[in-house]
Amino acid sequence: MNQQMQAIIYLGFATLAFSSMELAGKFVATEMAPLQVTFLRFMIGFLLLLPFAILEKRRKRITLTGMDILWLAGLGICNITIAMVLLQQAVTTIPASLAAIIISSNPIFVVIFAGIILQEQITIKKVIGLIVGIFGLTVVTNIFNTVSTVDIPGLISAVGAAVFFGLYTVLSKKVVSRLGGMITNVGSFFIGSMSLLVILLIKGEPLVAGLNRSTIWPILYLGFVVTGFAYLTFLRGLKLIDASKGAVIFFFKPIVASFLAYVILHETIGVNVLVGTIFVIIGSMIMVLGAKKAI
């Protein structure tokens, strides 16, 4: 089997797993709080990936500095404490397919934050992609006609998750260049999970309440498969194929997520969702492929 085929298999599994994230979250949304679900998910993912991070740290002889830890803390809070909690909150009140599509629009915000924070050049292609993506997001959410049919706070939470995940992506670029993707994610997973633990303890909310025969499997799936194995296969796939090509595969997440939600949850997929998803994917591809470096 050649490297390209291996990469397709690895990235295909990662895409399928990431696409099922909102679906799995939907199964526990009514019995477990968003903070609780996110804490358990990323703590499991941290424990699974920790041995790989230790091996990479020893192999590359990396020493964590105080500034590195501060950066990891910022990334963990931005991604896990804020973005992923907002996403789980959105899943509790809006269709899983809609939440998946909105979070997949994060490249739009990556371009915006990259221009502001990293002073990256805003090219014509990026501007065109940004306009197309925002138009697609507007069509998907059908914001002018969903007041009576879709929970607006849930919609805002999903958009907020996309915004903060885009910010996390931009901020992580400096850390990843020094520590590598595995160490960066494991470190941010741990600090983000610990911040959620502190919040849960302060609020007096239980850590494992709601875990039963119907919720334990979705939680384990989110932790081991979505947050653990999917990330490992994603990294493995990127080692075998050009990074920009790997990023393009993930633009299929809204399509796969919508299909899974339709088949398993029997969610209705409107024409606006189908049309808007196409524009979001096209806009994201224009922005990423139009950049000199993969975002």
Image: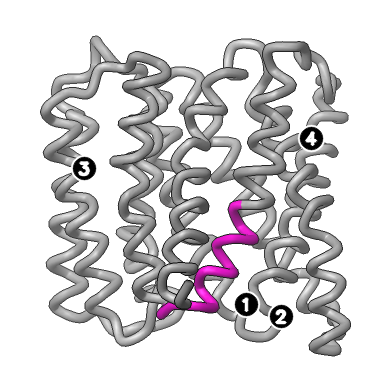
Identify the residue at image location x=30%, y=59%: 108
Instruction: Give the mark nearest the N terminus, 3 or 1.
Output: 1
CA separation in Å, label 4 and label 1: 27 Å
Identify the residue at image location x=74%, y=37%: 39
Q: Which residue is mark 2?
A: 179
> Farthest residue toward the front?
1
Q: What is the secondary structure assignment of the residue under circle 4?
A: helix
Q: What is the secondary structure assignment of the residue under circle 2?
A: helix
CA separation in Å, label 2 and label 1: 5 Å
Q: Which residue is mark 4?
A: 199
Identify the amino acid type marked 1: Val
Residue 277: mark: 3
Seen in the picture, residue 104 relative to 205 is either above or below; the reply is below
Residue 289: quadrant of the picture: bottom left
CA separation in Å, label 3 and label 2: 34 Å
Instruction: Give the mark nearest the N terminus, 4 or 1.
Output: 1
Does residue 113 appear left or right of residue 54 in this picture?
left
Identify the amino acid type marked 2: Leu
Seen in the picture, residue 150 relative to 235 is either above or below; the reply is above
* Residue 173 part of the magenta segment: no
Q: Which residue is mark 1?
A: 176
Identify the amino acid type marked 3: Thr
CA separation in Å, label 3 and label 1: 30 Å
Does residue 295 appear left or right of residue 141 in this picture?
right
In this picture, which residue range is highlighted in magenta?
230-242
Q: Quadrant of the C terminus?
A: bottom left
**Camera-side mark, 4 or 2:** 2
